Amino acid sequence: MPMISEVGRRDPRTRLLIAGLYAALVLGGLTMVVPFVLLLSGSTKSGVDVKDLAGIPRFLVDETMLYRKHVESLFNEQLDVMRAVYDSDEPSFEKVVPPAGVRTNFVAAWRAFLADDPPVQATTIGYMQAQVSRTFPKFLRAFRVSMEERFGGSIDTANRALETEFIDWNAFYLLPEDAFQRRSKPLDTALGDAWRAFRDTVPDAYRYAFTLDGAYKALFLKTQFTRSIEEFNRAHGTAYASYDEIRLTPSLPDGTPAEQATWESFVRNSLNLAWVRVSEDAAPAYRDYLRAKYGDLATVARLYGADWTAWDDVPLVTEVPWSGLVRSDWEAFITGWPDPDTGVIHQPTAAQLRIDSIEQQFRDHLRDRFGTLEAANTALGTSFAAWSDLLPPQKEAHYLGFLEHRPAIRHEFLTRNFRAALDHIAFHGRGIRNTIIYCGLAVLCALLVNPIAAYALSRYKPPSAYKLLLFLLLTMAFPPMVTQIPVFLMMRDLNLLNTFAALLLPGLAHGYSIFLLKGFFDALPRELYESAQMDGAGEWTMFWHITMSLSKPILAVVALQAFTTAYSNFMFALLICQDEAMWTMMVWLYQLQMRSGPGVIYASLIIAAIPTLLIFIFCQNIILRGIVVPVEK
């Protein structure tokens, strides 16, 4: 029978009251649903959209936002690298827009050039680092998985083979390559070889080349002249209308002395040695440098592992090695080596310096293929006025690759934070196993110890029953933090640290659970026990088959409380079990959150909430049956 009759519902005040109740329920529901929706949306965020509070991730419905997230990850969240590669002045990844058009023939020529075995340092791939989002991008995960499979999951075997010192697979990491700066060198180890072999299997859509024209402006000129072409013109006596007119020439430019000095400074001191060359007429200066540094040819030949018999046999370095004495000597020669005895600086002249950039190689490739610039423009659908204006169409190529791989890119951003969290807690360490054991034992102990104590107080009614209950309830007056240190000292004295016993014993009996159970047991009919006694039932039979069978709703409450307490136990679990092998999932999640971005944190919270939700749904059915069925009867 409804609480309000049909006639009563027609009264305007009653309708207003009902409407107010529904409104309050809807608002209350929204206060729970909206944060959860924002949590779900936040679990897909990266640096470019972390400030977006939309309930539905915008990249699912907005292609431009998806493109921005892709470009951000393509350049490993390094804005300066994107500016150098695209020769742009974008203030952030949030402002990146797709190109106005794609010259497909030009892009096809660029892709064909890259497929024709470019220098090892010419290109690299994205999705390897997320310094802003602080997550584990696609190809970092894939490379780590390939190494795990290769070495059978043993990090020790991997360390020995790859010449590394990773603590575990969670710490397996690789910094993105950088062929712009002088200080950057290729990884000349077994790990580097494995990485380059993996890199070559990645599709071109996720690859970018180290073009130097944009790097010269973005990483060198604009850092000194605050991006202002007017300031550059004043300093160099030039009249450029914008930075777009400046080109990094392969040799000393035909400009003002100040402009030549800036070019020389860039090549001598800043540009990565992979691209620096000298003309053949610098050979005498190079040999004089070696003679001044080492004294005699025999010493140089021995250190270089050569069999030279005359100084004229010493060749110029055409491609600098990645490491070793030759690289060190070559870098000193390019920069300028002062002779400590004579004070003479040994170095090539500015006119002898050369740059063998990837864009210059691309121009030479097209010149060999088409012969003239006019023929190249006709075939490629371009309109360059000079060969020096022809720059690789990387932005167009990347956009075309983005269009070709949109489903995979969207799937990556939807799942990568969840994969990072799952990979951290599920596949490395024993967090899930430890949590299952700990929570299972906690629920089992709670359903044995607490009911037995409550049954004894309810069945036998000792004179001190209420004093005992008061004592048990008083234990809840102290926050758990107050007792953690004494408990730790006691567990240490008992040699129980880093064991499940140390986690379980301090909370084996719960005062509030005993209080609830006693109240429920007191409400059970006494006649049931009298009948059972007349039939010869023992105390254990009455406890198990009568008390426990009729107390499933309250037992579900106790089990749910025991599970949530054990499952969410972080600080105590970390204090008692400092051995990583005994860490529970909450401790692993805390470690993950300390070094992750918001997206991974949100994803880990959602993953952590799933077991609690499932347990609550399971216990809820039992609790509701205990409430609804007796009322219906």
Image (tube, rainbow, N blue to C red):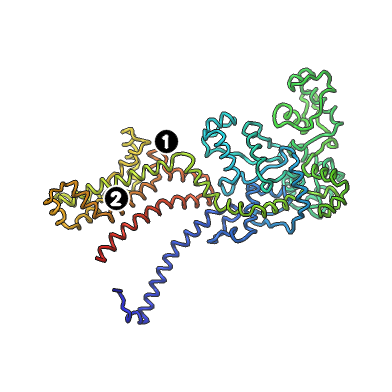
Residue at screen point 82% across, 32% down: 348
Report which quarter residue 185 is drawn in: top right
Amino acid type, residue under disc 1 in the picture: Asp
Front residue of 484/341: it is: 484
Report x, y in % for residue 425.
Answer: 47, 43
Q: Residue furthest front?
A: 535
User: Does residue 314 sit above or below 527 in this rendering?
Assistant: above
| Front: mark 2 or 1 | 1
Using residue 383 as the reference point, say whether residue 17 is left or right of it.
Answer: left
Report which quarter residue 33 is drawn in: bottom left
Report x, y in % for residue 275.
Answer: 76, 38
Front residue of 632/25: it is: 632
Q: How many numbered badges does the structure rendering display? A: 2
* Residue at the disc numbered 1: 579
Residue at screen point 13% across, 54% down: 531
Mark 2: give few (<14), some (14-19) or many (20+) Cα within 10 Å: few
User: Does residue 34 sit above or below 604 in this rendering?
Assistant: below
Using residue 370 as the reference point, say whether residue 429 is left or right of it.
Answer: left
Using residue 52 as the reference point, say whether residue 426 is left or right of it.
Answer: left
Mark 1: give few (<14), some (14-19) or many (20+) Cα within 10 Å: few
Report x, y in % for residue 268.
Answer: 77, 37
Residue at screen point 52% across, 49% down: 418
Secondary structure beneath dot 1 equals loop
N-terminal-most mark, 2 or 1: 2
Q: Quadrant of the N terminus?
A: bottom left
- The answer to whether residue 230 is seen in the rendering is no
Secondary structure beneath dot 2 equals helix
C-alpha separation, residue under disc 2 versus residue under disc 1: 29 Å
Report x, y in % for residue 599.
Answer: 53, 52
- The answer to whether residue 279 is seen in the rendering is yes
* Residue at the disc numbered 2: 476
